[in-house]
Image (cartoon, rainbow, N blue to C red):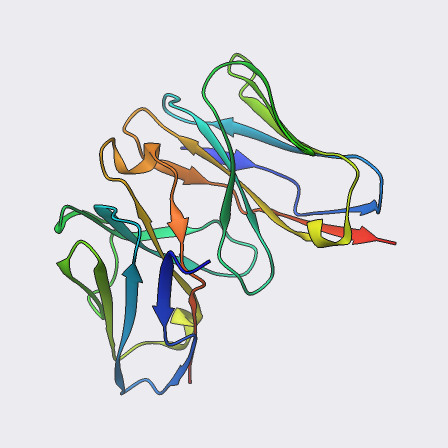
Amino acid sequence: GQNIDQPTEMTATEGAIVQINCTYQTSGFNGLFWYQQHAGEAPTFLSYNVLDGLEEKGRFSSFLSRSKGYSYLLLKELQMKDSASYLCAVVDSNYQLIWGAGTKLIIKP
Amino acid sequence: ETGVTQTPRHLVMGMTNKKSLKCEQHLGHNAMYWYKQSAKKPLELMFVYNFKEQTENNSVPSRFSPECPNSSHLFLHLHTLQPEDSALYLCASSQGVRGAGGETQYFGPGTRLLVL
């Protein structure tokens, strides 16, 4: 079957750096998305990786290794507003989007 | 963000009621989606419409009935729901050019549904 694994919950300190990992086993691969979802709000797009390597976008970076079935989202200079759930989703060979259950990130002062 | 709107935001209904959820997108997209989001579970794709044609129905019970009158509007009609249907129902849209899953999706804020 197809599977996306990411930690259920993580805690980090304001101003620090946190890495949220996502591993996947899917039938084929056509890209990987990261979305951010604040409590009670809509998921919003953060990043899309289809080639190996690191994509940097301000304080957020996303990394992909297709050979390892692995991605991470790196958040730098954490702010309280970064407290949210982070959803990893993989596009399989049929262009179906397979979602992880999300990682709830708690930022402490 | 008003690209995708959903009404109502909250809904409480009995198991014998009939209600409808509405979604509207103002992004000029051609694909629209209904998802169910339950606590600590992955998003469950329910229905996909691309250029007003239903392209996916992921084994959703018939008590959920979608309707897509045009590319900007999507409805989810609900009848005789069960308590386990209580969840957040999210609508999303995308350009609809590539395969539905391969595009960035833009989500509405969701309808929080409670079935008593």
User: Residue A22 at what x, y percent from top left?
Assistant: 59, 32
Q: Residue at x 41, y 38 (%)?
A: A98
Left of A1 or right of it: where is A35?
Answer: right
Q: Nearer the viewer, residue B37 or A76?
A: A76
User: Residue B29 at what x, y percent from top left?
Assistant: 25, 46
Q: Residue at x 27, y 40 (%)?
A: B95
Q: Nearer the viewer, residue A15 or A51?
A: A15
User: Residue B18 at what x, y percent from top left?
Assistant: 24, 83
Left of A35 or right of it: where is A17?
Answer: right
Left of B13 or right of it: where is B79?
Answer: left
Relative to B47, say whether A75 is above or below. Answer: above
User: Residue B112 at what x, y percent from top left?
Assistant: 45, 72
Relative to B71, say whether A87 is above or below. Answer: above
How many tags in the picture? 0
Q: Nearer the viewer, residue B24 or A3?
A: B24
Residue A94 found in image quarter = top left
Relative to A78, say whether B91 is above or below. Answer: below
Left of A63 or right of it: where is B59?
Answer: left
Quadrant in which the C terminus of chain B is drawn: bottom left
Residue B72 found in image quarter = bottom left
Relative to B62, say whether A57 is above or below. Answer: above
